[in-house]
Image (cartoon, grey):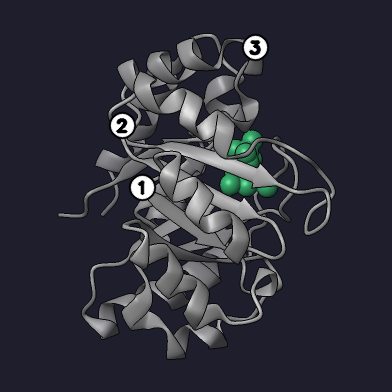
C-alpha cells in the first residue's frame, strides 16, 4: 500500500498571516509544508528565505520541504538546515557539482532531493540515486503558482517510478505544479506519492475540504 503525502505550497498562502496559515493547513491534514524559494535569477520571481523558514518552524511539527529555485545553491543550503528545514531539493541547473550539493544537504542532517523541470532530461539520476531521498518532477515551469498541469509529465512520472522501483531505494516521488482534486488520481496512478498543491489548497476557503477530497481520490487509485 503506497503512503501518499500532501504537501501544500505556502506560495499561495497569505504571507501576512503565515504562522496561522501553516497551523491551519496542518490541522487540515497536510503531511508537510512545501516552501518555495525563488531568487529572481534562476526563476523570474522572488519569494522567501531562511528567516521565514525559521519563523514558521515553531508553528508546525510536520517536515518543512524546501524547494530551492535558486542558483547557485551551495551557499544557502546550510542556512536552511539551521532554519529548521527537513528536506531540501534543488534543480541540477542550479549546481555546478550536483553530487557535492546533495552530500552537503545530507551532511547538514536533511533529506536531499533533485528537481526536474518539464523539459529537463533525467539522465543525471543514474549517477546519484544513492544520494537521493526525494525526486521532484515539475509539472509546470517553475516561478509561479496557479499554472496548468503539463500532461506529458505523466510519462516522466512513470519513468521515474520505474527507476525508483528498480533501485530498490526508499525515494519519495513528488510532483509540483497544477495539482488539483480532479487530476491527483491520475498523477498518483502514474507513480507519484507526494503531491505539492498551492493554489488548489490555499486558494480555497476550506483547506480540510480540499485535502479530504484529495485523499478520497487517492484512496481509489488502483
Ligand atoms: C512553482 C512552485 C510550486 C507552486 C505550485 O514554481 O514550485 O510549488 O507553488 O503552485 P500550484 O499548485 O498553484 O501550481
Ligand atoms: Zn515548489
Instruction: Name the image quarter holding the N terminus.
Output: bottom left
Q: Please say if 191 is above or below 10.
A: below
Q: Is mark 1 within 8 Å of ligand 2?
A: no
Q: CA distance from mark 2 to mark 1?
A: 27 Å
Q: Please say if 32 is above or below 90.
A: above
Q: Please say if 192 is above or below 207.
A: below
Q: Residue at x 41, y 74 (%)?
A: 103
Q: Is residue 48 left or right of residue 64?
A: right
Q: Is mark 2 within 8 Å of ligand 1?
A: no
Q: Please say if 69 is above or below 114.
A: above
Indicate the secondary structure of the residue bearing disc 1.
loop
Can residue 178 be seen at all in this image of the molecule? Answer: no
State the residue position of label 1: 86
Instruction: Name the image quarter holding the C terminus.
Output: bottom left
- Count the marks: 3
Mark 3 Cα within 10 Å, few/some/many (few <14, many 20+)?
few
State the residue position of label 2: 216
Indicate the secondary structure of the residue bearing disc 3.
helix
Q: Which mark is residue 23?
A: none
Query: Counting residues from the N terminus, which is met first, the one under dot 1 or under dot 3?
Result: 3
Q: Are marks 2 and 3 in contact (CB under 8 Å)?
A: no
Q: Which mark is residue 16?
A: 3
Query: Counting residues from the N terminus, which is met first, the one under dot 2 or under dot 1?
Result: 1
Query: Counting residues from the N terminus, which is met first, the one under dot 2 or under dot 3?
Result: 3
Q: Residue at x 55, y 17 (%)?
A: 18
Amino acid at each position: 500500500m503506497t503512503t501518499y503525502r500532501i504537501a501544500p505550497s505556502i506560495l499561495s498562502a497569505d504571507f501576512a498571516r503565515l504562522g496561522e496559515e501553516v497551523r491551519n493547513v496542518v490541522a487540515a491534514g497536510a503531511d508537510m509544508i512545501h516552501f518555495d524559494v525563488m531568487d529572481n535569477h534562476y526563476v523570474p520571481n522572488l519569494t522567501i528565505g531562511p528567516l521565514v523558514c525559521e519563523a514558521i518552524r515553531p508553528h508546525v511539527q510536520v517536515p518543512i520541504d524546501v524547494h530551492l529555485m535558486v542558483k547557485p545553491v551551495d551557499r544557502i543550503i546550510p542556512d536552511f538546515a539551521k532554519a529548521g528545514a527537513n528536506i531540501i531539493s534543488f534543480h541540477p541547473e542550479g549546481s555546478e557539482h550536483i553530487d557535492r550539493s546533495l552530500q552537503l544537504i545530507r551532511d547538514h542532517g536533511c533529506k536531499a532531493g533533485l528537481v526536474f523541470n518539464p523539459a529537463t532530461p533525467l539522465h543525471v539520476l543514474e549517477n546519484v540515486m544513492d544520494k537521493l531521498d526525494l525526486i521532484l518532477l515539475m509539472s509546470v515551469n517553475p516561478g509561479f503558482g496557479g499554472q496548468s498541469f503539463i500532461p506529458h509529465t505523466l510519462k516522466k512520472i512513470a519513468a521515474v517510478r520505474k527507476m525508483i522501483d528498480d533501485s530498490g531505494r526508499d525515494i519519495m516521488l513528488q510532483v509540483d505544479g497544477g495539482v488539483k482534486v480532479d487530476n491527483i488520481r491520475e498523477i498518483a496512478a502514474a507513480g507519484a506519492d507526494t503531491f505539492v498543491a498551492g493554489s488548489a489548497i490555499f486558494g480555497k476557503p476550506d483547506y480540510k475540504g480540499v485535502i479530504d477530497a484529495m485523499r478520497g481520490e487517492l484512496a481509489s487509485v488502483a
